[in-house]
Amino acid sequence: MKNTPIGVFDSGIGGLTILRALRRTLPHEHLIYFGDTANVPYGGKSKTAVTRLALDVARFLESRNVKLVVVACNTASAQALSALRKQLTVPVMGVIEPGADAAMRATRNRKIAVLGTQGTVESQAYVKAIYKRNKDIQVFQKACPLFVPLAEEGFENKPAAELIAREYLQPVQDSRADTVILGCTHYPILKNLIAKVMGPQVTLVDSADTLATSAQQFLQEHQLAATSGKGSVKLYASDAPDKFTRSARMLLHDPTVKATLKKLNV
């Protein structure tokens, strides 16, 4: 089991930010990543649809003999994690809890804002996770649905992206939160832009490194961690694998990775 891969999935390229952190933290591990590009974004879909899509992708990863499934998608973590854990035979880890932990450590004025997709915001998953830790924290949420297509299209440095970011983030600034959770794995692609708008006094929480550390701890505790050899990466995309490959090479800083097309029956 130590040398079997870790499965990671997201609706598109956003989860590659988590894959990058996993590669850095777990250099000996073999990683399989599935970008469900045929169905991106998950954020505006119903819980039923998100759960169906997530289960189909996760079952594919399970068929590849993975030892752990990492749900590198906040919407799927918020809406489908329970179903995944019930129906898969391998452990499943989501991004909500590590993100909430990191925000709790970072906040100074006990005001936390969550940026997320409509699905993540409506699920209240981050609010519940934060209140479970401290009910006295003030939590403000803001759905930012256009951030996902901006990230997918590589528009993070375009003037239009800044206009949209300023529109979305004005009420977040008004909330006076000193800590902002990037509650979608696409959003770290826009991290420099969000930091520019929010200012240096605000801490941005990207759960990628926190999740990678949690995965490392889990593998060590269950004696599943690979301890030698060089890890590998295998990429799958449910649509447009060439476009996905270009994005992956840029985000992973690796010109050798290439995505394979794998269509799902959904």
Image (cartoon, rainbow, N blue to C red):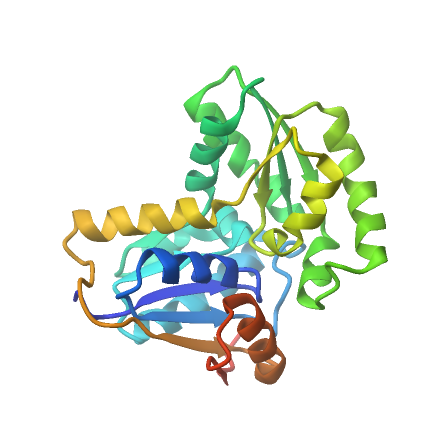
Residue 175, placed above or below residue 41: above
Apparent side of residue 173 relative to residue 72 in the rendered image (left or right): right
The image quadrant where one finds the N terminus is bottom left
Q: Residue furthest left?
A: 223
**Residue at horizontal 31 percent and vertical 76 percent from the top:** 64
**Residue at horizontal 28 percent and vertical 55 percent from the top:** 91
Quarter of the image where one finds residue 120 = top right
Residue 59 image offset from top left, x and y in percent:
37, 69
Residue 132, placed above or below residue 52: above
**Residue at horizontal 62 percent and vertical 52 percent from the top:** 187
| Residue closer to the observer: 9 or 181 | 181
Residue 257 image offset from top left, x and y in percent:
47, 79
**Residue at horizontal 78 percent and vertical 46 percent from the top:** 165
Residue 153 image offset from top left, x and y in percent:
71, 68
Q: Residue furthest top?
A: 136
Image label count: 0
| Residue closer to the observer: 175 or 57 | 175
Apparent side of residue 133 relative to residue 175 in the rendered image (left or right): left
Residue 6, placed above or below residue 81: below
| Residue closer to the observer: 54 or 112 | 112
Residue 38 image offset from top left, x and y in percent:
61, 74
Q: Is residue 156 visible?
A: yes
Apparent side of residue 63 relative to residue 186 in the rendered image (left or right): left
Q: Is residue 143 visible?
A: no
